[in-house]
Amino acid sequence: MVLTRKVRLSPKGEIEIMIEAESISPDTFAGKSEMEIGRLAVWQGPREAQLLEFFEIDVTEEETGDGVSAVDILIDGDASRVKRIGQRMTSGRIEILGSAGMHLGSEMAGGEIRVRGNAGPWAGMNMTGGLLEVGGDAGDHAGSAYRGSWRGMTGGKILIHGNARSQLGGGMAGGEIVVGGSVENFCGIRQNGGLIVVGKDAVRGVGAEMVGGSIVVLGRIHQFTPGFGAAGSEVDPTIGDRKIEGRFAKFTGDYAISKSPKGVLYAREAMI
Amino acid sequence: MPTMVIKNGHVFDPLNEIDGEVMDVFIKDGKVVEDLTRADLARAKAIDARGKTVMPGGVDSHAHVAGAKVNAGRLMRPEDHIGSVRQRTEITHSGSGYTVPTVYKQGYDYSAMGYTTVFEAAMPPLEARHTHEEMRSTPMLDMGAYLVLGNNWFLMRYLHEGEVEKAAAYVAWMMKAHKAYGIKCVNPAGVENWGWGRNVHSLDEPNIHFEVTAREVIHGLAEVNERLGMPISLHLHANNLGHPGNAEITKESLEVPSDVVPSQKMGVEWAETKLDPHRAQSVYLAHAQFNAFGGTSWRDFESGAAGLARYVNKADHVVIDNGAVPFGPATCMTGDGPSIHDLYVLAGIGGQKWSNTDVELECGSGVIPFTYLKGNPISAVQWAIGLEMLLLVEDPWKTIMTTDHPNGGVFTKYPQVIAWLMSRRARDATAAECHKWGYDRSSLGGVEREMTLFEIAILTRANTARTIGMAYRKGHLGEGADGDVAVYDIDPENFNPADSDEVIRAFSRADLTIKDGMVVARQGEVVAIPEGRRYYCKPEVDEGLAKDMMADVREWFKYYTIGFANYPVPDKYLRKPEAIVVNGAEGGW
């Protein structure tokens, strides 16, 4: 018999200044009562506040026959003005019925986050493990390295069903990012490992300065990055343990930054 | 001003030849005194230092802590700040940054380690305002800055033409104009060439347009320095920095001013010391580690420290600071633009961020993030060289411990460097974790020497103060010295220097840091925020000579992008200035 703690956070109303709520994490909630969770600190601008100012909190426990004991967090409304949800989490689950603010699951190492709406910028920044799934769109820098650094995501998986914006997977060294929709600029900039799949189009700068890893773009690339060289074509390429269907033109790069780069970019032949 | 007595500590005060003796230290109105009257004792704050180590407040003679290149390092490295954050307290500001902290954090971090005095080692004249602005905002510390003059157009012209007197008049004016403390010389003649994409690689290679050689610049500036009688000697960053085999040119460079006689003509009152508090050197070599490379390429790269140390052992006109490499993140920043470019090229795949600046008629600068890894062969050898330079030079009064912060590593790693200096076992343990080149390509593995607390006090306060001309008030606990004291939680009678964790713990957080007789940090926590003094020199020269020199300056000033009236740093940039009159008593010459 194991115990699953279910923590339901119901937004009390509109949040004026965005709050920094890295305390919303299964790791932090584990073993805490409703009152203790409510008293967890969040910053609102220069003011230190408590979680209970912004959310109704309801904790229930459920016994299940197997698995490991875990903490499930449900935010049953909009959290687009709540930043850092699930930051550095290592286990458990977070589900958000609305949208989430900046830094959702940044530096997360394990567990799962599912947001039905959109995620703000920096979702999954420097992620090392776990699953981050976004039902809607993601902002800039999803799965990217922190500003100033090119040591980014090393593991885990990010699924974005809608579109992502710029610098998706910047400095990525491992793991996987799959975007159902389109991306804007510099997707996979400075990538040196891992896989990025873009379901629709990319604006420009795909794989700029990449030296390793793979990027697959199924739609159109509006402005192709100049430092790539053609390397033949492939049908249904297998990248890691994932097979991608279709006829692809294969490119290697970015020769603008390295003499022997190991970055691979697949573009659908039908789109060229 | 506070009065206190620090009782029964083991005192290490090398300038007064006190080596761990149990005694009381008395401070009256912020200054060290021999004794206190009964009345003074009654009102004095008493501190029990029984079973603890008492040293003069730490003095750092070479760090990069204020000014344009330091701030460039901050701006280009947000990733250096995200993981290194200091919360504000009731009395302190918040701060962030690991290799290039904000000015507040810098002040607090130094103070936590028992340091009270820090000198910025490279202030470009045109950036003097910026440097003073940052120093003005730095809490806790007494400070000053060395003026970068090794590639200055006016000086290169004078020195090439043999006009040493006019050069001295110019330096005197520049010290006053920019509120600067000493002369820094960075890659002499080479940085000017860098403006044309080139460098110089020997002492006798004339540079572009000025046709002056590094030898002429080094000798000329050393001569100017002693003619004026400056507190600190020439602080030299030698040519070919960071190149395999540069130990040779370093020796040759140090030999250049060997005929220049040190002479401090300072209008100050000297606190009492048993040893001569005047400096003995006419050249102070900066970050010897970066200039003690052997081999001919990165393939046969090895330490050149043994040869350089042999030279220093024979030369009595030389003091060095080591610029240790304690491993980990660093931000290399120097007035030597071409050396940073070389590092940028060397750093493997291009595209690493890098900043380069040309400072008009004066100098240049480069900044690049860098990480020293134990597994990297070059880093391992650099680690060894940094320690060799201190351990192979026999006379500790010729050496100073630094990391050339933040070039070799951050100043908060000083305690780690102390641990290596004090224990062979600590060095062996690190060598075992390092790339084998660390011991294979240096002599460090054969060095038995282990420094004592007395020697550590020489390398971190006594000799630092003496070398830069601050021993008239800093670096010792003689009568009349500033009441700057560090109390460390080390009982010399019950202390195992091989226990590195313990050494690092004790030196990272001074039990008490006392400045001007006031406790400012307790176990690393800042408890008071004193406003630091800003030292600069006011050299006096013959008026006629100064007039001739100014005519030359005005002639070439048209090449600057700023107006003449805006060039000097106004007094209001210094909140607590301490001008040192130099060359005053003797008058002109």
Image (spheres, coloured by chain):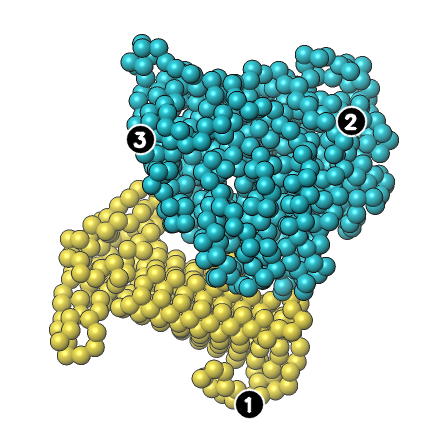
Type of residue at label 3? Arg
Alpha carbon distance from label 3 to label 2: 53 Å
Label 1: how many Cα within 10 Å (few below 14, some 14–19, many 20+): some
Q: Hue of chain B?
A: cyan
Q: Hue of chain A?
A: yellow
Type of residue at label 2? Ala
Disc marking residue B145: none
- How far across and down, in percent of the image, does residue A159 sit? 40, 73
Alpha carbon distance from label 2 to label 1: 74 Å
Type of residue at label 1? Val
Q: Residue at x 42, y 52 (%)?
A: B83
**Residue on which disc 2 sits:** B167
- How far across and down, in percent of the image, does residue B233 sit? 66, 30
Q: Earlier in the sequence, mark 3 or mark 2?
A: 3
Front-most of residues B134 and B429: B429
**Residue on which disc 3 sits:** B50
Up the image or down, B112 lies above or below B380; here it is above
**Residue on which disc 1 sits:** A235
- Label 3: chain letter: B
- Label 2: chain letter: B
Label 3: how many Cα within 10 Å (few below 14, some 14–19, many 20+): some
Q: Look at the numbered disc 1 and give the secondary structure of its residue.
A: strand
| Residue A272 falls in image quadrant | bottom right
Front-most of residues B589 and B131: B589
Asked if the residue under mark 1 is in contact with the one under mark 3, i.e. CB atoms within 8 Å, the reply is no
Alpha carbon distance from label 3 to label 1: 79 Å
